Amino acid sequence: MSCDKFKDLLMGYLDDEISEQERVELEKHLTECDECTKELADFKDLKSITDDITLYQPEDEVFDQYWSSIYNRIERAAGWIILSVSGMVLLFYAGYMMIEEIIHDETLSWVFKGALLAFIAALSVLLVSVLRERLNTRKKDRYKDVRR
């Protein structure tokens, strides 16, 4: 018989979670199979290591600080999103106002006008994105005090 069935039973055997019939079959197989016997020994070693582990229970203040930190990060992320979106809208509107005459010109094709509006929208998004990234990396820049 294949060892796969018995390998699935090894941890259950150690934890005493298999039926009596499975236990008898496994013990018989272990007397005949060196590979499964070695794997059982490895599992025993692993179980002895993990049984000795004690988990550290942090103080309640640690959890309070953790949740406070999460709320602060969520608030800041929401603030950055609102600031970024409003900045993009304002820049797009300013760009639209600058080229309003071109948009209302009947002699120009709608493709040109659409491409021009898409260009202004993309430029607005990129400008806000780069500005936000520069502000974030400026405070984390390890080399800001290095003279060049």
Image (cartoon, helix red, strand yellow):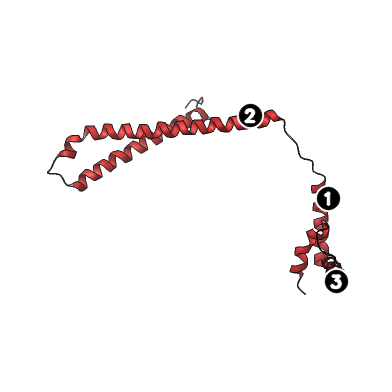
Q: Which image quadrant is residue 96 in?
A: top left
Q: Earlier in the sequence, mark 2 or mark 3?
A: 3
Secondary structure type for disc 3:
helix
Q: Which residue is mark 1?
A: 48
Task: Report the side of 5 relative to 114 (left or right).
Answer: right
In percent of width and height, residue 48 lies at: 83, 50
In percent of width and height, residue 50 lies at: 79, 48
Numbered circle sitting on residue 141: none
Residue visible at 79% across and 43% down in the picture: 53
In percent of width and height, residue 136 lies at: 48, 31
The disc labelled 2 sits on which kind of residue? Gln
Q: Earlier in the sequence, mark 2 or mark 1?
A: 1
Residue visible at 79% across and 52% down in the picture: 46
Residue visible at 21% across and 43% down in the picture: 113
The nearer-to-camera label among 2 and 3 is 2
In percent of width and height, residue 32 lies at: 85, 71
Q: Which image quadrant is residue 89 in?
A: top left
Q: Which residue is mark 3?
A: 32
Q: Are marks 1 and 3 in contact (CB under 8 Å)?
A: no
The disc labelled 3 sits on which kind of residue? Glu
Question: What's the distance in space between the residues labelled 2 and 3, CA to CA?
Answer: 56 Å
Task: Report the side of 126 relative to 106 (left or right).
Answer: right
The nearer-to-camera label among 2 and 1 is 2
Q: Which residue is mark 2?
A: 65
Q: Is residue 143 something that shows in the picture?
A: no
Secondary structure type for disc 1:
helix
144 or 103: which is nearer to us? 103
The disc labelled 1 sits on which kind of residue? Ser
Task: Report the side of 33 relative to 103 (left or right).
Answer: right
Secondary structure type for disc 2:
helix
